[in-house]
Amino acid sequence: MTQRVTIASWNINSVRFRLEAVERFLREAAPDILCLQETKVEDGLFPHPLFEQLGYGHRAIKGQRMHHGVAILSRLPLADHGHHDWQDNGEARHIGVRLPGGVRLENVYVPAGGDVPDVDANPKFAQKLAFIERMTRWSEALTEPTLIVGDFNIAPLESDVWSHKQLLDVVSHTPIEVEALGRLQAAHGWVDLGRRFHPAPARLFTWWSYRAKDWAASDRGRRLDHMWASPAVAETAVAHHVYEPCRAWLKPSDHIPILTEFAW
C-alpha cells in the first residue's frame, strides 16, 4: 500500500521568536514532518507544547543557546536519533533520524561562511569548506536510502541567484563553494529534488536578505535551502513546493519553507 508522506524544511531563525509563523505553516501546509534549522534555543527551553498540541508528537532536537540548532518535528514515529559533528567543534548543526520504512532523514545547517571568500583571511570560510568536505566523506560511505535537507548556505546554479555575475565573489555563490557542493553531490549521487521538479533556469529562490527595504520588489533572492535524496528515495518523490508567501508574514524568517511529497 502506497503512503503519501510530506517532508518540509525551514530555516526559522529562532523558533521561539517565530512560533506563530511555524504554527500557521503547520496548520496551512500540514506536512507530516518539519525540519527546522537555526532554532536558536537550548533543548530544555524548546517549545514542545505547541507541537504536541498540533499532533507532532515525535521530535528530535539538537539545540544551542542563541546560535544554530536543529529540530525534526513529526507525526510519524522517529527512531535512531543521532547527530554528526561535521563542524568538528560541537556546534548544533545536524540531527538525523530513521523514518518508518527505513529511510534516513538528515537535517543540516551548513555554516554561512562569513563575508570574505578566502580561507586564509577568513576562518569562517575555511570552516564552511571543511564542513562540506566532512559531509562529502560521509556521503561516500553511505549505503542507506537517505534524504538530506536543510540550509546548505550555497546557491549552486547560475539561476539559483538573482545575478550570477554580481554574486560570483559573494559568499554562498563563489566558484570554490559551488565546486565543493558539486563534489558532495557526486559522492553519493544525490538528486537535487528542487531542480528535479523545477529545472533550471526556473526561478526558485528560498532566501531574501533582511537588508532590502522591499524584498519582493527588489527580488534579490538566492536558493540556499535544499532537499537531496538518494536515487532510490528520489524515485518516490512526486512534487516539490516552495512557500514564498511566508517571507511576507509577520516577523518573517529570511528563509522560506520548502516541501517535498513522497509516495512510499
Image (tube, helix red, strand yellow):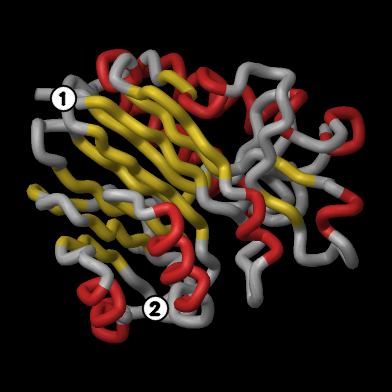
Amino acid type shown at disc 1 = Thr
- Give the residue displayed 26% in from the left and 40% down from the top: 105
Give the quadrant of residue 184: top left
Residue indicated by mark 1: 2
* Number of numbered markers: 2
Alpha carbon of mark 1 to alpha carbon of mark 2: how far? Answer: 37 Å
Quadrant assignment for the C terminus: top left
Q: Which mark is residue 215?
A: none
Dot 1, how many residues are within 10 Å of its Cα: few (below 14), some (14-19), or many (20+)?
few
Vertical position of residue 105 compared to residue 36: above or below: above
Q: Nearer the viewer, residue 220 or 171?
A: 220
Residue indicated by mark 2: 41
Q: Residue furthest bottom?
A: 45
Question: Which one is closest to the eye, mark 1 or mark 2?
Answer: 1
Q: Nearer the viewer, residue 256 or 189?
A: 256
Q: Secondary structure at mark 2?
A: loop
- Give the residue displayed 45% in from the left and 59% down from the top: 28
- Give the residue displayed 25% in from the left and 84% down from the top: 44
Residue 93 location (% of width, % of height) = 39, 56
Give the quadrant of residue 64: bottom left
Amino acid type shown at disc 2 = Val
Residue 260 location (% of width, % of height) = 41, 35
- Left or right, 15 with respect to 129, comes to left
Dot 2, how many residues are within 10 Å of its Cα: few (below 14), some (14-19), or many (20+)?
many
Can residue 138 be seen by looking at this rendering?
no
Residue 251 location (% of width, % of height) = 64, 76
- Give the residue displayed 24% in from the left and 82% down from the top: 49
Quadrant assignment for the N terminus: top left
| Lower sequence index among marks 1 and 2 | 1
- Left or right, 191 with respect to 97, comes to right
Residue 200 location (% of width, % of height) = 68, 18
